[in-house]
Amino acid sequence: MKNHIRSIIFILLISCFITVSGFSQGKQEKLDEKTTEEVLPFKEFIRLATTNDTEFEQILIDELTLTYQKALQIPAKDLVFSVKQQHEMYLSQNRESPDTTLGLSKLFPYTGTELSLSYEVGSSIGSSSESSEISFSIAQPIAENAFGRSTRLLDKIVGLEVDIARHQIIEAYEDYLATIMTVYYTWYEDYQNLIIARSSYKENLKLLDNIKERQKENVALPVDVNKVQLQLLSKKEKLIELEEKYKNSFNVVKRVVRRTGEKTFIPKEPFKYTSLEKGFEYNFEKFTEESRTFEILKKLERKSSFQVDRDADDLLPSIDFLVGYKVAGEKYMIEEEDNMLFAGISIEWPFSDQVEKAEYEVSKIEDRKTNLSTKNTYYKLHSQLSNLYLEIKKEEELIGIADEKIRLAQEILEDESENYSFGKITLNDYIQAVNDLDTARFNKIFHESEYKKLLIEWLRLTDELVERKNISSKIEKVKEKYNSN
């Protein structure tokens, strides 16, 4: 009768152990509510990271250079003032005279038109008195860069390069954002695993105390105590490993949000960003029609096509139509002037044109290469996203299986605890049931974390994580910060 009462007490103790252990997720939620540690939700983490992490500023500062790309590459339209002063000595005539030339010139790059105005005063070999001349001329290219055609092509090429660079800045921003989002998911996964490990260690500690009590009552053998102690050491070993892993991920989080000091905070379960309920083909077609990636590919094709046209233009001879007006006279004020109106053509035509021909052929090859790259990228992305889609769906199924395994492991542990208390199974069988439940719970945390990380990778690859309008204000702040310095 006495042993029967002890068995009943042991069953109740084991049942309490299972109840507490089996519902550790509910216990974790209560822990979050009662903890004095600061909770750092996912959205707040992202806000702090994008505000404080200077990696983002380093990415966005490249935007500042794009404003100057056309000024760097398009021929300058500045008004140029020139002065030339020289002292001339006529050795055979034993005399000397100063010579001064003033000039103004202006290029209109988008039409190719160049205006020149000059004034020159000085003496000549045939006369010792000063003479002066003022001239005005217009040069208009009519073959190579005819009416600014090559410059306008260059303007389109540079414009496409700037657009592509802006897209690439957003992609770099998006890539880093995906990285820090994964940091949070890893932190949350490590936090959940640590809670499970702590709970398991505490409950196994209680189990050891219960086994020791049974040994005192001659119900449990010394070998049973040793087995539970070994189990407890394994749980402690796992706990130490997970504590170290959690501290590492926590330190990464602190770096991202730029926090220092000893203050700690804990994560909150992040929400799921997206689902792919409409199937792969629908989502991939949407990606090809709306994404930055394919917009960049289209711009690259247009850029290479414009480059072919521009290199073809360079094969033409340089022919300028010239028209001008000249006034020449005596002394500084052009006295007794002669007026002249002139018009003509200036031609510069290299007959071999070796470099330009080579550049033209290379640009045609690069154009074909760009077209092939677009096609290859399409199929590469289709395969990559298709496999990623399969991984996402796999994780969805594994999460469902993990839930079912936890339910079954919980029921098995409840049954095995009763069986062990009545001596129907060995302690080894009971310990195995305990470990199976822990394994199932760790497994679910892993698959949930992998699922969320895969969704973030899908959004990153399909350009859905960041849009330019979402970071325009951040770009403006970077500009303001730069201008203020």
Image (spheres, rainbow, N blue to C red):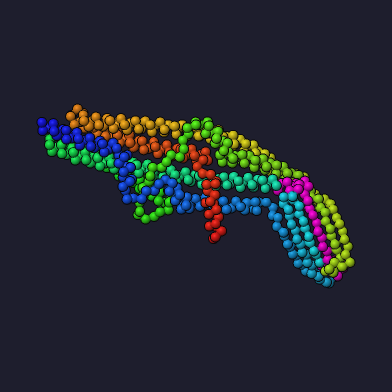
Magenta span contains residue 433: no
Inspect this view and state whether residue 380 appears.
no
> Which residue is drawn at the image coordinates 24% and 40% (left, top)?
203
Judge from the rendering whether residue 439 lies leftward or rightward of residue 287; answer left or right: left
In depth, the one of 205 and 267 nearer the eye is 267
Judge from the rendering whether residue 22 lies leftward or rightward of residue 286; answer left or right: left
Above or below residue 7? Residue 189 is below
> Magenta region: which residues?
122-151
Quadrant of the image for the C terminus? bottom right
Residue, far bottom: 94
Residue 92 sits in quarter: bottom right
Judge from the rendering whether residue 389 lies leftward or rightward of residue 37; answer left or right: right
Magenta span contains residue 125: yes
Residue, far left: 1
Which percent across, then down, holds residue 397?
40, 31
In depth, the one of 421 and 360 nearer the eye is 421
> Which residue is drawn at the image coordinates 16% and 33% (left, top)?
8
> Which residue is drawn at the image coordinates 14% and 37% (left, top)?
215
Quadrant of the image for the N terminus? top left
> Which residue is drawn at the image coordinates 74% and 50% (left, top)?
111
Q: How many marks?
A: 0
Inspect this view and state whether residue 284 appears.
yes
Which percent across, then down, holds residue 74?
67, 51
Above or below residue 309? Residue 119 is below
In depth, the one of 310 and 405 nearer the eye is 405
Q: Main structural element of the magenta stretch: helix, strand or loop?
A: strand
Judge from the rendering whether residue 72 lies leftward or rightward of residue 31; answer left or right: right
